[in-house]
Image (cartoon, rainbow, N blue to C red):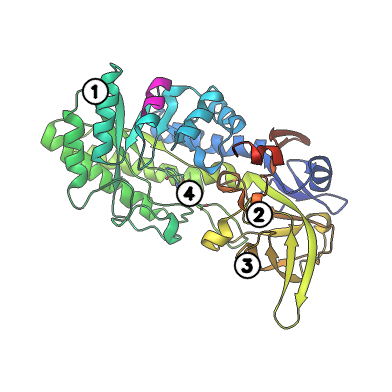
Amino acid sequence: MILSDCFEVNEAGHLTVGGCDTVELARAYGTPLYVMDENAVRRNCGLYRDALRECTGGRGMALYASKAFCCKEVCRIAAEEGMGLDVVSGGEIATARAAGFPAERVFFHGNNKTRAEIDLALEYGVGRFVADNLEELGRLQRAAQEKGTVARVLLRVKPGVEAHTHAFIKTGQIDSKFGFALSTGEAREAAERALSLPNVELMGLHCHIGSQIFEIAPFLLAAERLLGLRKEIYRETGRSLPEMNLGGGYGIRYVEGDDPIPYGKELHVVAETVARRCAEDGMETPFLYLEPGRSIVGDAGLTLYEVGSVKTIPGVRSYVAVDGGMTDNPRYALYQAAYTAVVANKAAGPADFCATLAGKCCESGDLLQESAWIQKPEEGDLLAVLCTGAYNYSMASNYNRIPRPAVVMVRDGRARVIVRRETYEDLLRCDC
Ligand code: LLP
């Protein structure tokens, strides 16, 4: 087992995922190739679903944050596993809809939902809008009124909690583009405004403090602060908001040293804190939502590349160039994100070669990892980067007119394509 139980090494010394030999997958489907282990995705959904059900007495639901990896098949799997869905754009709504995702379990997020997206969401019948700003509340009121309906809303609150993670993926602090600040009174005013709108029904509060977080303390602090605001709203308006959404952000293990929080234990502590605080305040415990993205799909995926060249600069470093790069995984270029890499056809050998893994784009920063210890590679070898299931396919680009790879879903030794590889024709489709 390497990092997670999806990844093993077989008798041939090849890396396997979901019981499939990666060398055979590369031969059958080409490279670069994203591979996802279906059992792992389902298992991760189940961990949240079961833990939440148990610790809230059935008054909780996990929503899959589809931004982590959005395609029809993953939406279908999330629906089958009893998850709700977090969407942030018309495109994610269109995908959920095409997958037949039950609309009432869809939560529409985003800090600048356009009127057209709001109309699309109302037409689909999404369960909740997570409102980010006053202008949006106005747009929701107008859109819902015109359609003769009511938009059910949670307010996105900035609880002023600093999570220890990369600055670009921190969102709970006051200096953030997302949501209403708690400390300035903005969130309370927004609640009053929402409660005054006839076609808006305020259901509760939401926060999301950041991503790839390994500690429980910031989640508890955020929950406490949201409950404080809920109590204040109750005192001032007599309305006890029935729902609370604590967002996502649970970290996963990308490298051996990463130590993620065990969800089951973690969720119990969060749910207990919420219930205890509500009891102390003499208020009803709200229905609890969580929105994991990375921890649903991240450790279920890997990316396969073919090695094209190995360039050793004496006294400097060795570059191993592969047939993908920042176009299929921009996370090193953006966040210096750590990953574990393996030469998949030599996976049983010693990882005694230190390399900078480079992509094929015309860009020096197009790197997948620096100072990675891997088996000594040569032209034609297969390089696997592990735990790429989240924020890889969904953040991929066509820079340098490089087509996006296919995504193959594996399960118990069988493989099927869930997103086909882009062709040059796809790339030219929008050109006039
Ligand atoms: N809910 C909301 C409102 C969010 O904004 C996010 C992530 C999530 C849930 C899911 O968070 P997760 O469980 O995946 O940490 N592109 C970055 C991550 C950005 C996360 C954005 N929001 C990365 O590659 O690390």
Farthest residue in the left direction? 236
| Element type at mark 4 | loop
Q: Earlier in the sequence, mark 2 or mark 1?
A: 2
Are there few (<14), some (14-19), or many (20+) residues within 10 Å of tag 1?
many
- Circle 2 residue: 3
Image mark for residue 159: none
Q: Report the side of 362 relative to 191 (left or right).
A: right
- Circle 4 residue: 250
Image mark for residue 199: 1
The amino acid at mark 3 is: Ser
Which tag is nearer the camera, tag 2 or tag 3?
Answer: 3
Are there few (<14), some (14-19), or many (20+) residues within 10 Å of tag 3?
few
The magenta span reads 118-125
The amino acid at mark 4 is: Tyr
Q: Position of residue 148 (x, y in %)?
A: 28, 16
Q: Which of marks 4 and 1 is nearer the N terminus?
A: 1
The amino acid at mark 2 is: Leu
Quadrant location of residue 76?
top right
| Element type at mark 1 | loop
